[in-house]
Amino acid sequence: MLPEQEYQMWPDAKLLDLLKLDDRKAFDMLYKKYSAKLYYAAYNLFRDRDVCEDLVQELFIDLWTKRNQLNINSLEWYLKVAIKNRVLMYLRTKKVTLDISAIELLTEKYSADSQLLQRDISRVLDNNVALLPKKCREIFTLSRKDYLSNKEIASRLNISIKTVENQITIALRYLRSGLTDYLPSIIALLLMYALK
C-alpha cells in the first residue's frame, strides 16, 4: 500500500489502473475527487439530498463492482455520462419532483456558455406559462418575472395571500408536467454544464 499523499498526485488513468487491481485507496481517492461534484450537479436539479446522495453512491458502487471490466479513456467524461443517465432514469420513474427554480438558476449561471440553451429553456417555460389560466398566469408572472412577494401580489390584485400561494402551486405543478417531454434533453445539457 502506498501513502495517501502519493495517490493524490496521480492522474485518473493511474488511479483507474490501480482500481482494476482492487486497490481500495485508489477508489477512495476517485470518490473524494468526484463525488461532491456529481452530487452538486444532481442536487441543483432535485433539491432532494437523499435522492442525490443515493444516485452518487449507486454510481460509485457500480464503478467498484465493474472495476475489472472497465475500459475508460476519460474518467471525468464517464462519470458525467453515468450521473446524467442515472438522473434521467430516476426522472422517468417519476419518484422525484424537479425544481423549476433550480433549472432557471442553472440556465442563468451557464448562459455565458450556452445562450442557445437559455433561449430554448426560456421558450419552453414561456410557452407553458402562456397555457396557464389567465389569473394563474398573471399571479405566476408577477411572482417569477416581476419578483413581487406573495403579499405584494395579493395587495395588487386584491386577493388573499392564500389564493396567491395556491395559484403559484398550481402553476408550478402544471409547468412541471408540461416540461416532461423536454426534461431529458434539458437535464442532459444542464448536467454537462454543471459538471464542468
Image (spheres, rainbow, N blue to C red):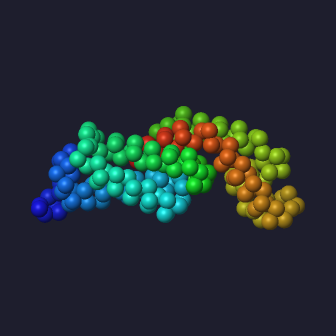
Q: Residue at x 25, y 56 (%)?
A: 27
Q: Residue at x 69, y 52 (%)?
A: 172
Instruction: Give the quadrant of residue 155.
Output: bottom right
User: Which quadrant is the N terminus positioned in?
Assistant: bottom left
Side (left or right) of 36 relative to 184: left
Q: Position of residue 145 (x, y in %)?
A: 69, 49
Asked whether the viewer can see residue 56, the reply is yes
- Residue 179 or 69: which is nearer the viewer? 69
Question: In the picture, which quadrant includes the C terminus?
Answer: top left
Residue in front for this viewpoint, 126 or 68:
68
- Image quarter for residue 76? top left
Left/right placement of residue 36 relative to residue 116 reads left
Residue 33 visible within the image: no
Tell me how many marks there are: 0
Residue located at (34% from left, 56% from top) = 61
Q: Residue at x 60, y 39 (%)?
A: 182
Which residue reaches farthest top?
A: 116
User: Percent from the top left, x then y, of residue 3?
Assistant: 13, 63
At which x and y percent is residue 127? Answer: 71, 38
Compared to residue 102, the image places residue 123 above or below, namely above
Q: Answer with the quarter of the image where residue 54 lies.
A: bottom left
- In the drawing, does residue 60 fall left or right of residue 177? left
Q: Nearer the viewer, residue 8 or 85?
A: 85
Could you tell me residue 73's position as x and y percent? 26, 38
